[in-house]
Amino acid sequence: MKRLLQLLALAVLILLAVLLYHTLTLPQADSRVAELPDLPQAMDEDAMVGRLAAALRFPTLPDQPNAFVGFHDFLRDSFPLTHQTLSLKAFGHSLLYHWDSKNDCPPQLLLAHQDVVPVSSPEKWQKPPFAGVVDDDFVWGRGALDDKGSLMAILEATEALLQSGQAPACDVYLAFGHDEEIGGREGAVKMAAWLEQQNLRFALILDEGGMMLPGSTLGMDRPVALMGIAEKGYMTVELQAEAEPGHSSRPPERTAIGDLAAAIHHLQTHPRPASLSLPTRKMLEQVAPHQSFAKRLVFANLWLFEPLIIRQLEGKPETNA
Ligand SMILES: [Zn+2]
């Protein structure tokens, strides 16, 4: 009995040593904050803000073709050098720009979308959704973040580089879809097919994606920038049930509606099993050095604590996803 206890104590000691080893050998938190470079001379901040606000005044919704036409005229007027230098191919209202570097190296593809989500109850908005209001703190409007902010930033950068006489080392493609919010079938799908036909392989594809999160979500004291490196898909299931019709006075033991309800209930109670995918594991590793000691110990020892972390993440719909 005494021997068994000794062995057990030894096992616990070894386990603790392994946990501590992993925790203490975690890379140190890199607390350097990169200074943003000064804006190039050509970039006038007020003018950029004004152009973003103006872009938001076009209600680029699926049922508003004129808004897209107006938006395209606005882009041509706002970014003259871009439109002189880059070639432009239209796919419906979608726009695909090509900046030819004359060099033979893998190109880059920058994406954004022009369309916005319809506004169902404008009276609930603090500022009208399509007024492009600018105050001391924000540029207000539908699409400011999703996704005209990206679109305008890409074009502002392109125009500023052209103004300062710079050209990219390798080709750059800019693709601005017009129906991203409703599936992208007429825009992104067609542009992608065309790019594939040209046999292009990109060194980098940058799309709208993650966001800045308050660090508290991940137990940190500073904001966290989430980079989306994959996109979650979805599945549509169609359920059909057949049963003998009959009279309500002599209901059968089972009805089609009952069978359907049982199937739907089964789907709801059997979600896909949770697992920590590689990107999620990498994210936990990256935030680990910024955590309290207890959390560092957990994150640094995923080999042991993975089930615990999964159970924790399953607790909230956002993290469960
Ligand atoms: Zn978007």
Image (cartoon, rainbow, N blue to C red):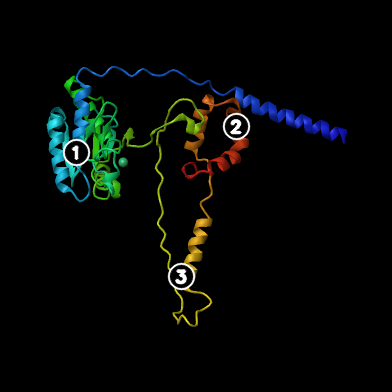
**Mark 1 or 3, nearer chain start:** 1
In the rendered image, residue 59, in percent from the top left (x then y), is placed at: 20, 43
What number is the disc on residue 57? 1
The tag earlier along the polypeptide, 3 or 2, is 3
Q: Amino acid at mark 3?
A: Ile
Residue beneath the point at 40% across and 48% down:
233
Residue where numbered disc 3 is placed: 257
* Amino acid beneath label 1: Arg
- Mark toward the start of the polypeptide (1 vs 2): 1
| Image quadrant containing the N terminus | top right
Q: Is residue 260 left or right of residue 17?
A: left
Which picture quadrant has residue 296?
A: top right
Q: Identify the residue at horizontal 59%, vertical 35% (top origin).
A: 302
Q: Nearer the viewer, mark 1 or mark 3?
A: 1
Pick the residue in front: 294 or 280. Answer: 294
| Other-residue count near label 3 (Cα within 10 Å), few / some / many at <14 / 14–19 / ≥20 | few
Q: Secondary structure at mark 3?
A: helix
Q: Residue 171 placed where, x, y %?
A: 24, 30
Q: Nearer the viewer, residue 215 or 227?
A: 215
Mark 2, residue position: 298
- Residue 129 located left or right of residue 304: left
**Disc 3 to disc 2, how far (Cα)?**
47 Å
Whether residue 219 is visible, yes or no, is: yes
Badge 1: residue crowd in 10 Å (few <14, some 14–19, many ≥20): some
